[in-house]
Image: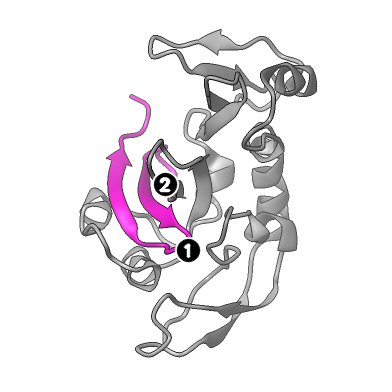
Amino acid sequence: MRSLKYKLAPLGAALVLGLLLGGCGTATTATNNPTKIAETTVTTTVNPANAAAAQAAMKFYLAVTLDQPRAQLETMLAVPGEIQADGQVAYRDPDSGYGVLIRFGEDDAVFAKRLLPSGRSPELAALNPFPVTDKQAYRMAVGMPFYEVQDVMGSDGIEISLSKPEAGSTKQVTGLGWFNPDGSYAVVYLNLPQGLVVGSEFVAGPG
């Protein structure tokens, strides 16, 4: 039986940070292949202070929704955006240093969002039961189901990116992240609603 240290809400139209909102309790882990692995019930134990700190750090990311008009988003965040070389726009919380990177669509509404970490991101690293490595990140094969990702990574991860389907596709892509105390982190990208791996990466910590 698999044992997970904390629980992220199940994959669906949009992953949400149930871990950050729920603190501790009992969660049901559903898999994408119930004929191979039955549902299991595990007890989640998340330090409430760590969960509260992580939620506060990620408030810009959590506040932004797909299809949100740019004018509404900028009024809500109340900070100036920094246009990047690729045309995306970064917004950072002056209090926490965390932020959100936005890709706007042709309609000037949010097409995709990604968390911008702050330095070593201690608030997020505190949520990981164990450090993660580049070897774990690159064990992800295209098409791997989510329950295998859980087994390799040791826990569910937290949502750090979400996008609308690209033109000609019906599948969204979300990124789940696992953070280390040195600021490095692994990201596994999954399509929605199937929850199958489409890619992965390992990002080195700050120098």
Relative height, residue 20 to residue 33 (above, below) = above
The location of residue 76, given as percent across then percent down, is: 78, 23
Q: What residue is rendered at 74% in x and 22% in y?
A: 77
Q: Which mark is residue 180?
A: 2
Q: Percent from the top left, x then y, of residue 50?
A: 66, 52
Hey, which residue is sitting farthest front in the picture? 168
Position of the C terminus by quadrant: top left
Question: Is 143 above or below relative to 31?
Answer: above
Residue type for callout 1: Asp
Could you say whether the residue bearing mark 2 is in a helix, strand or loop? loop
Question: Does 41 lie within the magenta span?
Answer: no
Q: Residues within 10 Å of mark 2 (few under 14, many from 20)?
A: many
Query: Looking at the image, which residue is at 44% across and 49% down?
Result: 170
Q: Nearer the viewer, mark 1 or mark 2?
A: 1
Magenta highlight on residue 179: yes
Q: Looking at the rendered structure, which numbered label has been put on residue 156?
A: 1
Image point (29%, 48%), residue name: 200
Q: Is residue 124 above or below residue 115?
A: below
The picture places residue 114, in percent across and down from the top left corner, at 51, 34
Q: Which residues are magenta?
A: 178-207
